[in-house]
Image (cartoon, rainbow, N blue to C red):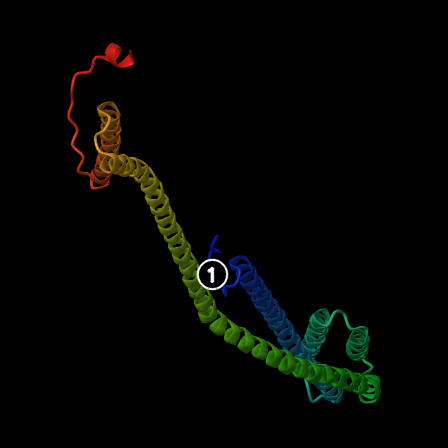
Amino acid sequence: MAKKPNYRRGLRDPRRSGIKWSIAAGVSLLVVSALVLSNARATSQTANDGVALARAEAALGANDLAIKAVGQAVLLAEDNALGVADAATLSLAMDEAGATLVELSTRVIELGEALDADPTLAALVEGAAGSGGAVLDMIEAGKVDGAGSALASNVVRRFEALRDELSSIRETQEDLLNSTGATATRIAEVVTFLVALLLPLGAVIAYRYAARRQLRNAESQLDTRLEAEREVVRAKDEFIGNISHELRTPLTSIFGFSEVLLESGVVDPTAAMDLIGLINNESAELTRMVEDLLVSARVEANALVYKNERVDIAKELD
């Protein structure tokens, strides 16, 4: 038996190819998701660093205003003691100094919250605001000289220490903001590049997969048609072999009996009639076979005509 040709030889298994592309798509999706998540985190960190930087700037401004307000209150207190400034002006300066100290504490507390409660910063603002409040208390108590001495020796030093810490925090947050901003920008560029690359790549892969699937379907249909044609050829070959055998049998008998008659002549009328009868029967069988072939050809050509007749069922059964 001839070996059936493999028309799909050399083609890869579609299931393995589909699994490979599915894994590649899954890995690509995970990479893009990780990059998007990293970009979101970097953006969030950039926003937090920006808030911390803004609060550090605000705290620095409040620190400068507070030390200047306390110094102004001391100067006005000294002028008031000398009779140069009136009490109303001094009272306004005292109120403003107290408000700036409260503002300083508020700004530093907000900054500490952005920095997860820095204990060093809390101690410095407590010392600066406390020493500034003590100076204002001395002015209210009439101890103007003591307030001036405290401002020069202690208060200014504490405010400067707080200012140095705030400046350091501002520089640190500025560096962090630049770093996280640059990182977020790079990640965003990578995500944009990958999305711009993966979208057309995904379209190409989808088109390639659809094309290969159509090709496999076409090959499957072609294999089916080829197999059907081979079945038809085998059926024809088998039919031709069978009909040749069936036709050969009556032809052999007819030929053999006629040869006997030609060689021996009609010596025995009874035997001759028997041979003639056999030849007639085989000829009738041969005619029936040929008629069946013609009917089969008319059936395939859809040209068979039926003639309806009444039939005696009982007679046919008998």
Residue 77 seen in render: no
Would residue 108 be found to the left or right of residue 144 on screen? left
Pointer 1: what residue? 8
Compared with 128, 16 (above or below) is above
Residue 252 seen in render: yes
Q: Residues within 10 Å of mark 1 (few under 14, many from 20)?
A: few
Q: Quadrant of residue 276?
A: top left
Residue type pointed to by label 1 = Arg
Residue at left 20%, top 15%? Answer: 311
Compared with 298, 2 (above or below) is below
Residue at left 75%, top 89%? Answer: 82
Expressed as whole percent of the image width and height from the top left, the position of residue 299 reads 23, 37
Expressed as whole percent of the image width and height from the top left, the position of residue 179 reads 65, 81
Q: In which quarter of the image is residue 88?
A: bottom right
Residue at left 62%, top 79%? Answer: 183
Between 278 and 144, the one nearer to me in the picture: 278
Residue at left 72%, top 81%? Answer: 169
Expressed as whole percent of the image width and height from the top left, the position of residue 246 reads 33, 37
Compared with 171, 29 (above or below) is above
Expressed as whole percent of the image width and height from the top left, the position of residue 193 reads 51, 76
Between 74 and 300, the one nearer to me in the picture: 300
The local secondary structure at tag 1 comes to: loop
Q: In which quarter of the image is residue 57?
A: bottom right
Between 247 and 214, the one nearer to me in the picture: 247
On-image quarter of the C terminus: top left
